[in-house]
Amino acid sequence: MQPQGHAQILINLIDFKMNVQEAGDFPRIHHTGSSEPTGEVMKTGGILNLESQFPYKTIRALMRRGHRIQYANGPYGGYQAIKRSENGVYWGASESRKDGQAAGF
């Protein structure tokens, strides 16, 4: 899940212009059943495991495209980050699904 989680955070930051906390708080997807380096080959297209906060409209659109959907509350990893804005301000974020906090001095 870790590489998928990292990619989702970056997509949220870059493509969807979310701030550093929003990017981590947004509902996550975990795809299972992919081809693996161990030689396991994906045969069924896999399953999209979604956190429950996804909008119904999004879920229906994924299903219309042929995705198999399941709901899961984890494991979606942990997230702490610091982002430097263009004007030099540092913004911290911490995973809302786990213990942690963003703090500075």
Image (cartoon, helix red, strand yellow):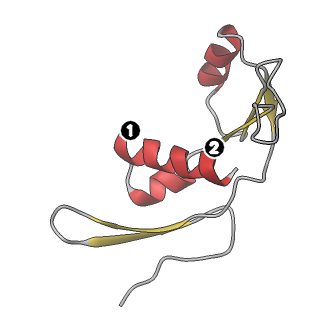
Q: Secondary structure at mark 1?
A: loop
Residue 67 position by quadrant: top right
Residue visible at 52% across and 46% down?
7
Q: Is residue 72 above or below residue 3?
A: above
User: What residue is disc 1 on?
Assistant: 16
Q: Is residue 53 above or below residue 66?
A: below
Please tell me the numbered disc located at residue 38. none
Q: Give the amino acid at mark 1.
A: Phe
In percent of width and height, residue 89 lies at 23, 72
Residue visible at 65% across and 18% down?
62
Image marks 1 and 2: residues in contact by CB distance under 8 Å: no
**CA separation in Å, label 1 and label 2:** 14 Å
Mark 1 Cα shell of 10 Å, populated few (<14), some (14-19), many (≥20):
few
Q: Quadrant of the C terminus?
A: bottom left
Mark sitting earlier along the chain (1/2):
1
Q: Give the amino acid at mark 2.
A: Arg
Q: Count the marks.
A: 2
Mark 2 Cα shell of 10 Å, populated few (<14), some (14-19), many (≥20):
many
User: What residue is disc 2 on?
Assistant: 28
Residue visible at 76% across and 31% down?
35
In percent of width and height, residue 91 lies at 35, 69
In percent of width and height, residue 66 lies at 71, 11
Q: Could you tell whether 23 is left or right of 43 in the image?
A: left
Residue 99 position by quadrant: bottom right
In percent of width and height, residue 101 lies at 55, 77
* Residue positioned most to the bottom: 105
Q: Could you tell whether 40 is left or right of 24 in the image?
A: right
